[in-house]
Amino acid sequence: MADVDEELHERVREIVRTIPEGTVASYGDIAARAGAPSPRLVGRILAEDGQDIPWHRVLRTSGYPAPHIAREQLARLRAEGVLADGERIPMRRYRWTD
């Protein structure tokens, strides 16, 4: 990614890599932990360079996955024991805290 600082890019990837199985985080959670200027930047990093890390554990703050990846994301989360309420993951129940 040409306009993203490489250190920030790797920090975002490392944080996502450490989200424990069975929990989720929001794009905003990851942005805050990484010091990223916006949740959208986190989404962009994951879209372009997140296939080898647990990208499916990162959701919108509302608990909804992005529509274009919803089916796969919800299936991956279900396999880890994270159960959706309809199409939404209950963030209060599954949000990663440390």
Image (tube, rainbow, N blue to C red):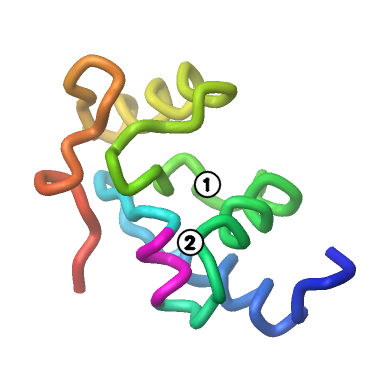
> In the picture shown, does residue 21 fall above or below 11?
above
Q: What residue is disc 1 on?
A: 55
* Region rendered in magenta: 28-32
Asked where in the image residue 59 lies, by quadrant, the reply is top left
**What residue is disc 2 on?**
16
Residue 17 image offset from top left, x and y in percent: 49, 62
In three-dimensional space, the C-alpha distance between marks 2 and 1, rounded to whole angstroms, equals 7 Å
> Given contact means CB atoms under 8 Å apart, are the residues at marks 2 and 1 in contact?
yes
At 42% across and 32% down in the image, what residue appears? 65
Label whose residue precedes the other's in the sequence (2 or 1) = 2
Q: Quadrant of residue 13?
A: bottom right
Q: Nearer the viewer, residue 62 or 93?
A: 62
Mark 2 belongs to which amino acid? Val
Quadrant that contains the C terminus: bottom left
Q: Is residue 6 magenta?
A: no
Identity, as a three-letter code, of the amino acid under mark 1: Trp
Give the percent coordinates (x, y) of residue 54: 50, 48
Look at 55% across and 26% down and name the residue there.
69
Query: Residue 81 in the image: x percent, y percent?
Result: 22, 32
